[in-house]
Amino acid sequence: MDVVVLSRLQFAVAVFFHFIFVPLTLGLSVFIAIMESIYVKTGNEIWKKHAKFWGKLFLINFTLGVVTGITLEFQFGTNWSRYSEFVGDIFGSLLAIEATTSFFLESTFLAVWHFGWKKVGKKMHLASAWLVAIASNLSALWIIQANGFMQNPRGYEIIAGRAELSNFLEVISNPYAWGMYGHTVLSAWLLSAFFIMGVSAWHLLKNSNVDFFKASFRKFAPITLISVCLVVLMGHTQGQNVAKLQPAKLAAMESHWETDSNVAFPLIVIPDAENERNSVEALKIPGVMSFLATNDFNAEVKGLKDFAPEDRPSPAIVTAVFWGFRIMVFLGCLFGLVALISCFQIKADMPNKLLLKVLNICVPLPYITIALGWLVAEMGRQPWIVYGLMRTSDGASQVPGGNVLVSLIAFIVVYSVLGVIDIYLLYKYSHKGPDAE
Amino acid sequence: MVLQSVWFILWSLLWAVYFILDGFDLGIGAMLPCLARNEDERRIMYNAAGPFWDGNEVWLISAGGVTFAAFPKVYATMFSALYAPLLMLLFALIFRAVSFEFRGKVEGENWRKAWDVVHFISNLVPAILLGVAFANLFMGIPVQPDANGFYLYHGNLLKLLNPYGLAGGLFFLAFFMMHGCLWLAFKSEGELKDRAITRANQLWIIVLVLLVVFLALTFVFTDLFQNYFKMPALFLIPVVALVGLLGVKAMLSKGKVFTAWVCSAVFCVAVTFFGTLGMFPRMIISSMNGVEALGAFNASSSQGTLTIMLIVALIFVPIVLVYQFLVYKTFSFKITKEYLDDKVAHAY
């Protein structure tokens, strides 16, 4: 196999695996800080216990997030060295700023939080919780700023064959990056809220630690609903960013082939990307695609055929992006429904059993949804590694294909083993309850 | 020129700080089978690195990030040329991190024993690889630009394991082990502490011998001394290194283990700068005939990026140093049996 294909596969494996662990870190860090704040403010011991219980799960999850993140930083150099040379001036500096401003803070104060229950005062301990929460969410901001440069490059000048920084403010005020950041972080909070709801539901179904998990159920049902609403809102905003900045990606997401105005939104579509058409388009709602993309029912929406075949995603990618997007949106709606029903059960003495079962089953779904979201964002960008500036095929390192094949297999094996152990430990400790050691 | 030189110095400094900090926890891990005799002692060794190893590793991320940001062409060439050793380093670091986290999470002796093996290997391997990698960078690696000016690597993993590379690997390993023993002696008491001090004394001799061997080989295999002959004042750096190393012995014989660790850190900084200043301004030396080296002046980022990065670094690196120092102070207590048994302490 060709080294570009292998490098892409390896990056996909590394980045998807990394992002299994990151969202729970982003959301749970904030939620734990909130729990501990309630404890420090009210003195109610149950919230200290909550902070510790979820904190233990946080730590199990965190480690793999960190080490798989190092992989990504290495991979730009090992497998995407031409890309790195081209964008290092801007992309590299965003990564370096992330490490200095956020990652140090996160790692250092997580240790204070983990080992410091007796060694530092209550307030200092709470401050550590917040520093971890702020630092991890700030870290995501810098990483997504870097990703934003791949999606919508700005603030650069091409000098001697590379993208040099011309305006730093323009780089970090990238509307694509900010939209993506909001959508990503909020969906991480959604995932974490569903995680808390799902684990709580499991215990309530087993009648274990009922008061303890009722407290988390009641506190997090509204948080779940709020986060779903915000994710959808930010998703819509980001969709409009994409419409403006990456019209080919938007067309792929909707499997929209012909440029037209006042475009209808078909509820049912089956794409036939090989033949540049859809084999089924049914239940069309007039003007809605134009409206979703631009807030204007009569606006023009570019079709895929308007882009030269070599400048737009390949048929296989269009199909993947289309289904990825549809399933993501569908699952998002499902989360809204479940969250809404959960909110109606806050006052109940014991939440409805069926709802609890559904919540428990829901735990893995946001993970899938977030992975699909990234699939849409990254595959939809193809064939570009830097949108409009550099093709993915020009970005890979010229290393022997055999090396990449070996490392790819190693990644798959090692990550699978560690992933299984980690998920087993999360499962084990989430079921043990707050009093177990 | 000034900005690029400043970044070259900062780049060296990041590596030096990384070696000081991650050096001791890698060293403790690599000494695990040679020091601990029972479960409590093993746990003391894990917890001597406990609150620190993660924050320490971020210095590696920063060193990598700064190479990427300030010297993109160096980063691209170095990381793709050293593909195999870097991925081995990466996998080792992955296993090391999970060995801390997973070991105590499941009851059972076999589970813990298995992770002890993983922990030992995953600490040993980075120590050696970092030494091998840096020695090869000092000596030069077979890279050559293609028609588009991209530097391609024309060697393989075995070529990196040449005598000089191996000497570098052993030297780093011995130093990290000594450095780790000193930290462990500081964090423990009783028999384990005594054993750590004995080992540190033995390793001190090995480090001294390997230092002499490494310097001699450096003279033979590399041109690092040229900068020193051009500017003899620079010879102060190896002198500082030697003073640091002698300080380790002197402090050890007085029983001042923490001061000995500080001397060891001084030695580490001096050795790192001895190497990088010998390379200056080069960062990638090609061992192939007539190929121009890549370095601070021909492979750096734009002035704009270097300036912004410098502002960020001047503000945040001191802040990082202050809070990491405070965290070290908070957790500078001795790890005791009582500490391990205290549920609220959440020890590994």
Image: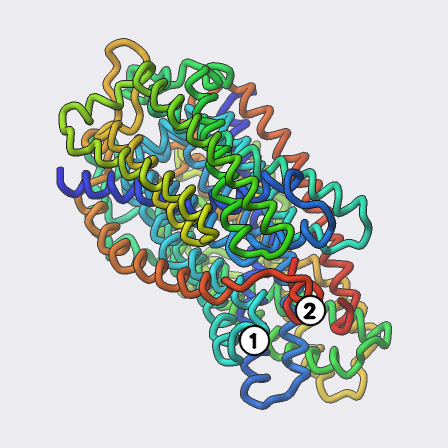
Q: Residue at x 34, y 53 (%)?
A: A97
Q: Position of residue B266 (x, y in %)?
A: 34, 45
Secondary structure beneath disc 1? helix
Chain of the residue displaying label 1 = A
Q: Position of residue A95 (x, y in %)?
A: 38, 48
Residue indicated by mark 2: B342
- Give the quarter of the image for residue B222: top left
Q: What colour scheme does the image use?
A: rainbow
**How far is the residue under mark 1 from the one under mark 2?**
40 Å
Q: Which mark is residue B32?
A: none
Kindly identify which chain the residue marked by label 2 belongs to.
B
Q: Amino acid at mark 2?
A: Asp
Relative side of A372 to B104, left or right: left
Q: Position of residue A197 (x, y in %)?
A: 70, 71
Residue at 34% across, 42% down:
B244
Q: Nearer the viewer, residue B103 or A386?
A: B103
Q: Nearer the viewer, residue B247 or A152?
A: B247
Q: In this figure, which residue is indicated by the disc labeled 1?
A: A226
Q: Nearer the viewer, residue A156 or A294?
A: A156
Q: Foreground: A233 or A165?
A: A165
Q: Position of residue B272 (x, y in %)?
A: 34, 36
Type of amino acid at the residue the image marks with label 1? Ile
Q: Is residue A179 visible?
A: no
